[in-house]
Image (cartoon, rainbow, N blue to C red):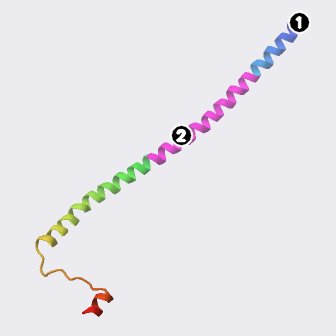
């Protein structure tokens, strides 16, 4: 094999390797952008869930106190709704 042919083959091989490396870095960039977007959206979702939980925790004690006072202090006995069959039997 002559030296000129060998040098040409090496140059082509080097050029091909650069193209492969460049294509790989482009696909890595696309993957990194997707990962960044996913991370950002996940962070926003978790922050929203935390805010909703905080709001729910703040509202929950009020509901419990209302329920406790209703149970402790009944102003009148509970009324029950009768169905049609029970009304016709009366």
Q: Quadrant of residue 2?
A: top right
Magenta-span inclusion, residue 77: no
Name the residue carrying label 2: 35
Give 47 or 68, whichever is nearer the viewer: 68
Tags 1 and 2 touching, CB below 8 Å? no
The residue at the point 82 percent across, 15 percent down is 9
Residue range (magenta): 16-42
Residue 14 versus residue 78 in the image, above or below: above
Looking at this view, name the residue that lies furthest to the top.
2
Position of the C terminus, as image quadrant, is bottom left
Q: Quadrant of residue 27?
A: top right
The residue at the point 15 percent across, 71 percent down is 71
Q: Secondary structure at mark 1?
A: loop
Residue 89 versus residue 67 in the image, above or below: below
Name the residue carrying label 1: 2
Residue 33: x and y in percent read: 57, 40
Position of the N terminus, as image quadrant, is top right
Residue 7 versus residue 35 in the image, above or below: above
Answer left or right for 40 relative to 28: left
The residue at the point 30 percent across, 58 percent down is 55
Q: Which of disc 2 and disc 1 is earlier in sequence?
A: 1
Residue 78 versus residue 29 in the image, above or below: below
């Amino acid at each position: 094999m002559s030296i000129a042919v060998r040098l040409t083959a090496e140059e082509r091989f080097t050029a091909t390797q650069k193209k492969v490396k460049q294509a790989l870095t482009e696909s890595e960039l696309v993957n990194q952008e997707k990962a960044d977007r996913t991370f950002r959206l996940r962070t926003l979702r978790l922050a929203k869930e935390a805010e909703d939980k905080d709001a729910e925790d703040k509202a929950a004690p009020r509901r419990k106190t209302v329920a406790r006072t209703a149970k402790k202090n009944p102003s009148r006995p509970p009324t029950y709704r009768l169905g049609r069959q029970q009304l016709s039997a009366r």
